[in-house]
Image: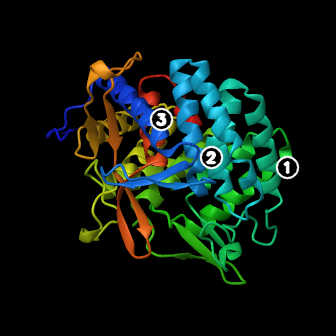
Amino acid sequence: MVAVNTTGDQPVSPREMLQAIELLFCRMDAIDQQCGNEFPLFSPGESNRWTVSQGGSWAGGFWSACWWLRAKVTDSIEDQRKASAISRQLAAKTAIDSGYRSLIFWYGAALGALWFQDAHAQQLTQLSVNAITHSFNPKLNCFPLGTAMGGGSRGNQAVTIDSFASMIQLLSSSDQNLHRFMAQRHTETMLAACYRDNGAVHATAQFDGRGFHPLGQAGQWSRGQAWAMLGLSRAAALWGEPYTTLARNACGYWITSRPDPLTPNRLGESISGYDPSASVIAALAMLSLANLLPDGESLRIYSYRQISAVIRSQFFTILQTDRDSIPDRRNGDSAIFWGCSYKTSPGVEELVESVWGSFFLMAALCALTGFVEPRHC
């Protein structure tokens, strides 16, 4: 086991990025072998002790997404079939009362429809869109969080930033104008409730009968700010201004408030530790926005720097395997990205390897190397 922990600010080369993609793809095979037909959710640190779920919880779509992404890069029919089979297991989640359904089905189904025109993925995408649009609350002018998947009794009076980007993408993939209209109304409500003039964004807001009131400190939670940047970059790609300027401001806030490319989990809390997964999501958002701006090169360079820092950090660990025992085309080595800060139990937050963290790191690397458009991931 070799931990990569290079000091300095040297960017990774294109060859190193390709190697990292290959190592993460190999890791998928090991996870699949260990977890079988159940969905892998997270594994603390480098322990390789996976918590699994039969239904996938809110993260199930990312396991399918990992295989859609791998199929996109490898052009492998076998990888595509694997992604489609996992996607089929998600169908029951269409009926769950949760805004997290957009995370499940944008990544778990819509990517298969977008990249491969997979018939089942197309059908599941449409079913999920129809189900989600029925949860639109015209009084709140948005899609509330919902009561399932941790939303609780007040979930139908709350909005959260986690599913902001995926809600925009999933509903805007519909061919119905009403669905795209709902996506923009949801975006307007989210921004009015959570966006501050300096580009910082609250992660959650609660409706009190008269209007939404944000909770916590805007921009403090790094992954929440990164989710907001990702959503705003999607809104900018779809609708232009004022979302392009809002996205630029949110990215600017990130850069000034988090000078270290390996960001803390929360600003101003020394005990909170790191959350490199937030850096990865932020980098993907900046790559998306950079393609929309005439002066976007600085954002592209900054994204490259953040991904390089993650790959060279102790949170990206290479596992070396006896190559003589591996019969397929890969050399047997794999890599764990265990830089995802996650609440593994009540009151306990720790760094884990997760399917969503691995997906976003692979997606950012694939965007930097030209395999995918960053706006799709």
Say which residue label 1 marks. Answer: 178
In-front residue for pair 227/288? 227
Q: Secondary structure at mark 3?
A: helix
Say which residue label 2 marks. Answer: 235
Residue type at mark 2 is: Ala
Give the distance between the C-alpha atoms of the residues marked 3 and 1, in whole angstroms: 30 Å
Say which residue label 3 marks. Answer: 363
* For the residues bearing labels 3 and 1, Cβ distance under 8 angstroms: no
In-front residue for pair 32/156? 32
User: Mark 2 vs mark 1: which is more N-terminal?
Assistant: 1
- Which numbered disc, 3 or 2, marks the residue closer to the eye? 3
Give the distance between the C-alpha atoms of the residues marked 3 and 2, in whole angstroms: 19 Å
Assess disc 1: are there few (<14), some (14-19) or many (≥20) residues with their C-alpha within 10 Å of its C-alpha.
few
Give the distance between the C-alpha atoms of the residues marked 2 and 1, in whole angstroms: 16 Å
Q: Is residue 349 above or below residue 186?
A: below
Task: Determine the residue positioned at 56% across, 25% down.
Answer: 71
Q: Is residue 232 above or below residue 27?
A: below
Q: In the rendering, at what x and y percent does residue 193 appear?
A: 60, 69
Residue type at mark 3 is: Ala
